[in-house]
Amino acid sequence: MSFDNGDDKRPTSARIAIWVVVGGIGAYLLISGILGILARGGA
């Protein structure tokens, strides 16, 4: 089930936008988690 126009090697702009948003959320959660651990002294 692919919505691409026959070119499977180049992702669509919509797919790129989704990955950017998901990656940004993941990076935010990862960084905030690391900062939270460091702020509490790892305990």
Image (cartoon, rainbow, N blue to C red):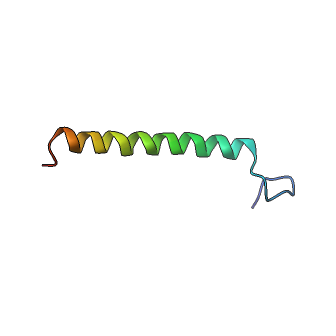
Furthest residue in direction bottom, as rendered = 1
Residue 15 higher or lower than 8, as above or below: above
Determine the residue positioned at 29% across, 45% down. Answer: 34
Residue 36 higher or lower than 5, as above or below: above
Residue 23, image x, y percentages = 52, 45
Viewer-proximal residue among 41 and 7: 41
> Total number of numbered labels?
0
Determine the residue positioned at 14% across, 44% down. Answer: 41
- The reply, left or right, for residue 38 in relation to residue 12 is left
Quadrant assignment, res 37: top left
Quadrant assignment, res 18: top right
Viewer-proximal residue among 4 and 7: 7
Determine the residue positioned at 41% across, 39% down. Answer: 28
Determine the residue positioned at 53% across, 44% down. Answer: 22
Residue 32, image x, y percentages = 33, 39
Residue 10, image x, y percentages = 78, 53
Viewer-proximal residue among 34 and 20: 34
Furthest residue in direction right, as rendered = 6
Residue 1, image x, y percentages = 75, 61
- The reply, left or right, for residue 40 in relation to residue 20 is left
